[in-house]
């Protein structure tokens, strides 16, 4: 089932393409984490105009396919004359999608913090920025580390959608190799093993981080 010759010939190309996959996942995760944290903080505030805007954003993003969002952004940039590569279009689209999901994780983490602790900090005259960055977010991230980690694992897999707008990442490189070798099974097995290896390593790292938090 697995052709060794194809494995030996295609593996270097696929490993090189893995760099693009990891770059997309890493950059989009930064956008997702920063955007999701901001959205999560906004969503934790009640009766706020920005809360209403954030709620609409999260609802739209979570209610539509990521593929549609990538294609929409790709076409939108071309229509309005923004000269940006397919790679960064994919990074932005995947990152904005991730932000919507991470915002819900952040919000749940914030909600799990004792209100009494927050009120006590306010009573002591601690500024809102210090409250957020030194009390709320550190505790929230300690609680939500596993969920954030799972989102990063998902981003590794979601990065494959970038191939649909011409980004040569792991899946796209695999398709190019298949068009030459006509052996889809061997190529997809190799790609699957690469994804599995990456996500297994990432899961082990996440588990170690979680254990260090629990000490």
Image: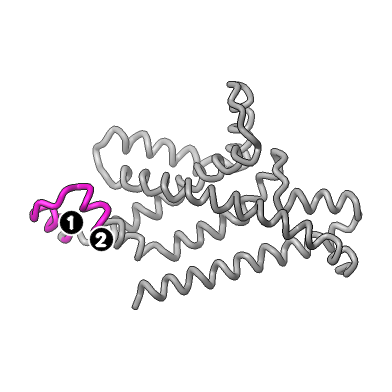
Q: Are marks 1 and 2 in contact (CB under 8 Å)?
A: yes
The residue labelled by disc 1 is 118
Q: Is residue 133 magenta?
A: yes
Magenta stretch, residue numbers? 117-134
**Which image quadrant: the C terminus?**
bottom left
Within 10 Å of the Cα at label 2, are there few (<14), some (14-19), or many (20+) other Cα atoms? some
> Vertically, is 171 above or below 76?
below
Q: Residue at x 52, y 45 (%)?
A: 95
Mark 2 residue element: loop
- The count of marks equals 2
| Magenta stretch holds residue 200 | no
**Residue 200 appears at what percent x and percent y?**
60, 70
Residue 152 lies, with reference to residue 63, above or below; the image says below
> Residue 73, located in which quarter of the rendered image?
top right
x, y percent for residue 77: 59, 27
Q: Secondary structure at mark 1?
A: helix
Question: Considering only vertical position in the picture, is 191 above or below 100?
Answer: below
Mark carried by residue 89: none
Q: Which mark is residue 113?
A: 2
């Amino acid at each position: 089932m697995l052709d060794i010759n194809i494995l030996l010939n295609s593996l270097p190309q696929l490993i090189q393409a893995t760099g693009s996959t990891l770059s997309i996942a890493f950059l989009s995760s930064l956008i997702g984490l920063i955007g999701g944290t901001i959205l999560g903080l906004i969503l934790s505030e009640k009766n706020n105009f920005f809360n209403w805007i954030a709620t609409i954003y999260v609802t739209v993003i979570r209610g539509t396919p990521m593929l549609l969002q990538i294609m929409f952004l790709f076409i939108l940039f071309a229509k309005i004359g923004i000269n940006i590569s397919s790679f960064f279009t994919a990074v932005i689209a995947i990152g904005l999608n991730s932000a919507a999901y991470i915002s819900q994780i952040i919000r749940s983490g914030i909600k799990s913090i004792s209100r009494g602790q927050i009120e006590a900090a306010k009573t002591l005259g601690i500024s809102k920025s210090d409250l957020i960055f030194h009390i709320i977010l550190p505790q929230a991230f300690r609680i939500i580390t596993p969920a954030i980690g799972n989102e990063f694992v998902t981003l590794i897999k979601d990065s494959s959608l970038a191939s649909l707008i011409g980004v040569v990442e792991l899946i796209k490189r695999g398709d190019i190799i298949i068009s030459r070798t006509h052996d889809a099974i061997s190529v997809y097995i190799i790609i699957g093993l690469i994804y599995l290896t990456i996500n297994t390593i990432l899961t082990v790292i996440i588990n170690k981080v979680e254990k260090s938090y629990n000490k």
